């Protein structure tokens, strides 16, 4: 192989040139070169007093070079998955894990950082540099630098195996999602589905060369069926296929079963925690979060659940009565809840997500997203269609402050084969000052799975999808508007995980306000703004079944946290029993015995949310309270916007999240705005 694009410096990833055969050689070479250079850095540090310039900066350079090679590979694995790339990605995981363990347990580096912390120079460093050093010393200890040799070795084995298992979990969910489909030739069988959904299913069929309509388990296909299909048996069939993915039940029973993967992941996590001196993996998880103790987290979740439960029960009782009287459903089954809820919403508020779609064509929504951000933070957006891209759907934008470029991002909006489900933001480049003094600008990946455009018309989003886009863009702004120049605390780096959702949830609020919607919404055919009556209905319906929705999130959070706090080495049956116990206590909706939600719960088994899913609710308290400052001053009050940018977005992880919130809000957070915004009558 003559040249390898992953080994060459580049401003943006050269996606078109990256081939699966480049991946392993590039990663191996970078890891070898990094190891050699790290040994030299450690030796120099041992011979004299290390400084920021002689220790931290060169290590940051090495980390960044590895990231610039691995970030595009990892992103392509999630968005353009194919067998060759999957194999190359998988082949690197053990190598990267071994390297990470070696680095985290490097005693010479640990001593060098401790010497820098104890030196006179430490007091002269800025807050971000000091924070980076403190975090690094903490992370050395969390990587087992103090452990005896055999325990260190076991730590490395656990980390390597966990890396492999979480990737397997993710792959099996993707494979199970793509293994099932149902072809329908008679449109009458799809009675109730809106035209946008029929167009999507027809496009699915056409792409595979079959007649009629193809239902898949990708969300833009699954969701309209479960929400709108009048055929109860069709809803049951699609629901069953969806909730049994990667499990021992359902149409592909046992083929991609994640049960043994979950068992091993949980056992290894608990072993890891014990190895490092923690009682449970939940305790280990909190070492890098705002919350102090498991009791604090469980108390927080339990309190919210107790407040929401009575109202949620009322909401479900209303749904049950409506389903019996208006839909002839004597007994609500799990596959009826979404359908009946949508019918009740339409009956009560005369509004549906489908009705709103024409007002949210993608070009208008993107333009509105940028205008909202410009008004809040004074930045501008410019598309760069010359930037290297990895798919025709993908667009690249630059963010400018006046004439000065300050960041960039890739926007990848539509579902497709080979793309992991869900929506997320990830880091392509981090803002940092290089050794040569130049500034590296931050670049983000923003990924969603919306229904793609069909028939030459723009894609039309539901209001739910608009809020999802704003949510992920909030993460992106946290990454891109940072002013930090130390990679460890730049953007979302170094931010406590239970505070990282603050900027994302905060952005969702602007999708509900007239002032925001006037920028975001315009009818695809007429260009008219969202009419007052529709806006009134949308706002009235905002808290429709909000207590049921809150309980659902709390159910996930309590299940995750208790799973990592109470069970030592759980079997699949133990996992199911715990989930059942949480549902028995708090859930108000019916459930199917065959539902294996946990087998595709990627957030905790393949993402960064293990013993941390509670972060969504924890941060929602912060975001609701932060937004209440805008309600008090004016939704687009420029001074409040500047203060939020200055005190929250620009600070990254340079200071404690609680300290940053207090600097913005002038006081500690209150739970009351969350309850008010959610329409929860505090019990």
Image (cartoon, helix red, strand yellow):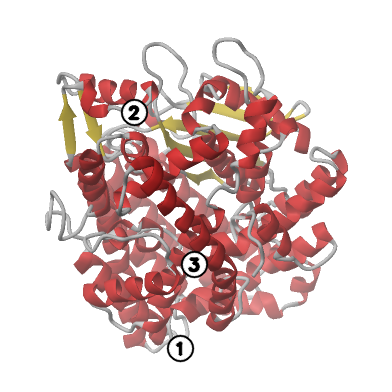
Placement of the C terminus among the 4 image quadrants = bottom right
Q: Is residue 654 visible?
A: yes
* Image coordinates for residue 433, horizontal then vertical, percent: 66, 48
Cα separation between marks 2 and 1: 55 Å
- Say which residue appears at 64% left-offset and 79% top-offset: 115
Pointer 1: what residue?
277
Q: Quadrant of residue 456?
A: top left
Q: Residues within 10 Å of mark 3 (few under 14, many from 20)?
A: many
Tell me the element at label 3.
loop
- The answer to whether the residues at label 2 and label 1 have Cβ atoms under 8 Å apart is no
Q: Which mark is residue 612?
A: 3
Which one is closest to the eye, mark 3 or mark 2?
Answer: 2
In the picture shown, does residue 589 fall above or below 43? above
Q: Is residue 331 left or right of residue 458?
A: left
In the picture shown, does residue 168 fall above or below 614? above
- Say which residue appears at 84% left-offset and 46% top-offset: 640
Tell me the element at label 2.
loop
- Say which residue appears at 67% left-offset and 74% top-offset: 116
Q: Earlier in the sequence, mark 2 or mark 1?
A: 2
Cα separation between marks 3 and 1: 19 Å
* Image coordinates for residue 44, horizontal then vertical, percent: 56, 70
Q: Residues within 10 Å of mark 1 (few under 14, many from 20)?
A: some
Pointer 2: what residue?
193
- The answer to whether the residues at label 3 and label 1 have Cβ atoms under 8 Å apart is no
Q: Earlier in the sequence, mark 3 or mark 2?
A: 2
Of residues 175 and 464, the one nearer the viewer is 464
Which one is closest to the eye, mark 2 or mark 1?
Answer: 2
Of residues 300 and 322, the one nearer the viewer is 322
Which one is closest to the eye, mark 3 or mark 1?
Answer: 3
Q: Earlier in the sequence, mark 3 or mark 1?
A: 1
């Amino acid at each position: 192989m003559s040249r390898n694009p992953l080994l060459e410096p580049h401003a943006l990833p050269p996606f078109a040139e990256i081939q699966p055969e480049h991946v392993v050689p590039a990663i191996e070479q970078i890891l070898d070169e990094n190891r050699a250079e790290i040994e030299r850095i450690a030796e120099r540090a041992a011979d004299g007093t290390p400084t920021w310039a002689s220790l931290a900066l060169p290590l940051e350079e090495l980390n960044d070079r590895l990231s610039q090679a691995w970030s595009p590979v990892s992103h392509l694995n999630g968005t353009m998955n194919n067998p060759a790339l999957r194999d190359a990605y998988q082949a690197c995981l053990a190598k990267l894990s071994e390297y990470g363990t070696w680095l985290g347990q490097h005693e010479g580096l640990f001593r060098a950082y401790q010497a820098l912390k104890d030196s006179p120079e430490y007091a002269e460093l800025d807050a971000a540099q000091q924070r980076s050093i403190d975090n690094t010393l903490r992370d050395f200890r969390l990587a087992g630098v103090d452990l005896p040799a055999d325990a260190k070795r076991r730590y490395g084995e656990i980390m390597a195996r966990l890396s492999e298992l979480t990737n397997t979990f993710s792959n099996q969910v993707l494979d199970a999602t793509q293994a099932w489909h149902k072809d329908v030739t008679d449109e009458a069988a799809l009675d109730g589905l809106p035209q946008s959904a029929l167009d999507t299913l027809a496009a699915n069929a056409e792409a595979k060369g079959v007649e009629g309509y193809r239902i898949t388990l990708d969300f833009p296909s699954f969701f309209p069926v479960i929400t709108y299909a009048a055929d109860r048996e069709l809803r049951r069939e699609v629901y069953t296929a969806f909730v049994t993915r990667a499990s021992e039940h359902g149409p592909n029973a046992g083929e991609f079963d994640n049960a043994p993967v979950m068992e091993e992941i949980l056992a290894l996590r608990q072993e890891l925690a014990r190895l490092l001196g923690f009682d449970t993996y939940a305790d280990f998880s909190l070492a890098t979060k705002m919350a102090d103790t498991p009791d604090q987290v469980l108390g927080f979740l339990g309190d919210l659940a107790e407040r929401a439960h009575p109202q949620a029960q009322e909401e479900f009782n209303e749904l049950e009565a409506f389903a019996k009287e208006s839909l002839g459903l004597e007994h609500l089954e799990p596959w009826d809840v979404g359908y009946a809820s949508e019918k009740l919403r339409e009956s009560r508020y005369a509004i549906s997500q489908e009705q709103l779609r024409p007002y949210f064509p993608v070009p208008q929504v993107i333009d509105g997203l940028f205008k909202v951000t410009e008004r809040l933070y004074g930045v501008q957006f410019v598309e760069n269609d010359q930037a290297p891209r990895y798919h025709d759907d993908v667009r690249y934008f630059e963010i400018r402050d006046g004439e000065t470029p300050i960041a960039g991002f890739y926007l990848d909006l539509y579902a497709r084969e080979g793309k992991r489900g869900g929506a997320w933001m990830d880091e392509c480049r981090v803002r940092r000052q290089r050794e040569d003094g130049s500034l590296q600008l931050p670049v983000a990946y923003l990924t969603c799975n919306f229904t793609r455009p069909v028939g030459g018309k723009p894609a039309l989003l539901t209001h739910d999808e608009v809020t999802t886009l704003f949510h992920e863009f909030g993460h992106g702004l946290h990454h891109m508007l940072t002013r930090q120049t130390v990679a460890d605390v730049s953007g979302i780096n170094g931010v406590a995980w239970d505070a990282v959702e603050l900027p994302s949830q905060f952005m969702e609020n602007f999708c509900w306000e007239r002032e925001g919607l006037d920028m975001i919404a315009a009818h695809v055919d007429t260009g008219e703004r969202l009419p007052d009556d529709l806006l009134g209905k949308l706002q009235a319906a905002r808290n429709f079944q909000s207590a049921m929705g809150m309980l659902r999130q709390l159910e996930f959070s309590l299940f995750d946290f208790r799973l990592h706090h109470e069970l030592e080495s759980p079997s699949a049956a133990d996992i199911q029993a715990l989930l059942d116990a949480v549902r028995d206590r708090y859930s108000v909706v019916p459930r199917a015995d065959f539902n294996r939600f946990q087998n595709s719960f990627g957030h905790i088994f393949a993402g960064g949310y293990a013993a941390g899913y509670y972060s969504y609710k924890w941060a929602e308290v912060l975001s609701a309270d932060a937004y209440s400052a805008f309600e008090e001053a004016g939704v687009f009050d420029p001074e409040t916007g500047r203060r939020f940018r200055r005190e929250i977005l620009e600070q990254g992880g340079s200071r404690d999240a609680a300290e940053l919130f207090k600097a913005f809000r002038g006081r500690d957070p209150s739970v009351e705005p969350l309850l008010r915004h959610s329409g929860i009558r505090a019990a």
